[in-house]
Image: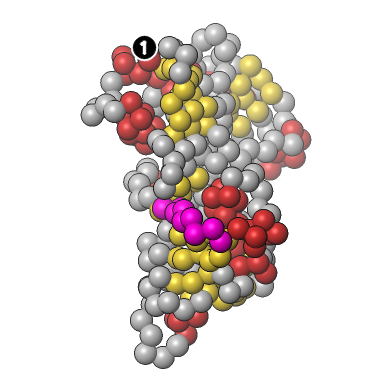
Amino acid sequence: SICGCFTSPSRQASCNYGIGTDGKVSLCVEEKNRSWCSSSNANDQRAVTIECASDKTEPYAMNSRAKSHHSVTCDSVNYPDTEIKKIFCGIMEQETFNDEYFLKTVERMVVQKTGSIDFHLKDGTVRHYETLKLRNSVHRTTSTDKFIGKIKCASCGNLYHRYSCYGTYVYWKCSGKSKARTECCGKDMADFNIRKVSAYILGMDEFDGAEFEKQIECITVIEDGSLKFNFMTGEKKSGKKRDHNTCDKEQIYSRFTWQSEKAQGGGIRPCFHRP
C-alpha cells in the first residue's frame, strides 16, 4: 500500500491516510497520533492529513488512476505555513507568532471553501478571518451576458468587452486598450472569477444572474486588479486584491485574494498535502 512510502524513519514524512494508485485508502498513522506531513508541528497536531499518489514532477498532479478509481475531488484552498502564522497574529493582535501560545489558545481551525478561516479557540469563542481566494489552476468555462455594459475601467474610464481565448476561456478586457491615444492599465479579468467574486460580495454560494442585475449598477476594475461594486441602492463594496508571497510549490494557486471592505478579520480542515 501507499503506507510503505513512509515506513523508513529516514524519509521524515508520513500521513494519517494514504490513497494509492489503485484507489485504495490505507491508514498509515492513527488519528490519535501526529503525522509528519507539513513543516508545522502545530498544523500537524490539528490536521487529519491525507497523501494521494501523484506525479513525480511539477506540479505533482494527483495520479489519474487514483482519482478515477476513488472519484477523489478536492477544491479546498491551501495555505503556506507562514501565511497562517501571519493571519493568526493579525486576528489575535500578536506582533510575532508563538508556537506555545498557539497550542494553548487554538482548539482547531477550519478552512472554508472560499479560503476563509475559522479559528475555534479553547475558551469557546471563534475568531473569523474572511477572504475569498481564487485559484488559477481551476478554470471554469463561463460566459456571462449580465456583465455587458456593467464593467468599467478605473484607469481610462472605458467599458470592458468580452473576448474568448483559444475559443474556450472567456475574459473581459478594457476597450480602451484598443483605442488610439488612450493609456490604460486595466487588468483583464476571467469571466468565472468575476462571477465568483460577485457571488461572494452578494452573499451567495453561486452566481445568480437575475440577482446580480437587480442589485449591481456597475463594477469598476482598479489598476491593481481589485473590484469595486456599486449597488443600485448607492452602497459600495470592494473586493481588494492583496499581495502575498508564497513558496514556489504554491505558485499553482492564484495570486488573487479578495477581501470585502466590511469583512472583519478565524485548524486546518482535512486536506491533501504534498510530500
User: Total of numbered circles in the picture?
Assistant: 1
One can see residue 10 in this view: no
- Residue at 38% across / 85% down in the picture? 182
Q: Is residue 126 above or below residue 150?
A: above
Residue at x 53% of width, y 66% of height? 218
| 204 and 178: which is toward the camera | 204
Residue 55 versus residue 259: which sits nearer the camera? 259
User: Does 123 lie within the magenta span?
Assistant: no
Q: Which residue lies most toward the left here?
A: 95
Q: Quadrant of the N terminus?
A: top right
The outermost residue toward the bottom is 180
Percent across and percent down for residue 75 are: 61, 40
First to last magenta residue range: 232-240
Residue at x-position 43% and y-position 77%: 157
Say if 88 sits above or below 241 in the image.
Answer: above
Residue 224 horizontal/vertical position (percent): 37, 62
Which is more toward the observer, 58 or 16? Answer: 16
Classify 268 as above or below 214.
above
Q: In the rendered image, which quarter is residue 169 located in?
A: bottom right
Q: Is residue 99 left or right of residue 35?
A: left
Is 261 above or below relative to 167? above
Residue annotated with mark 1: 104
Position of 148 with respect to 237 (left or right) is: right
Q: Residue at 54% x, 58% y: name it.
A: 233
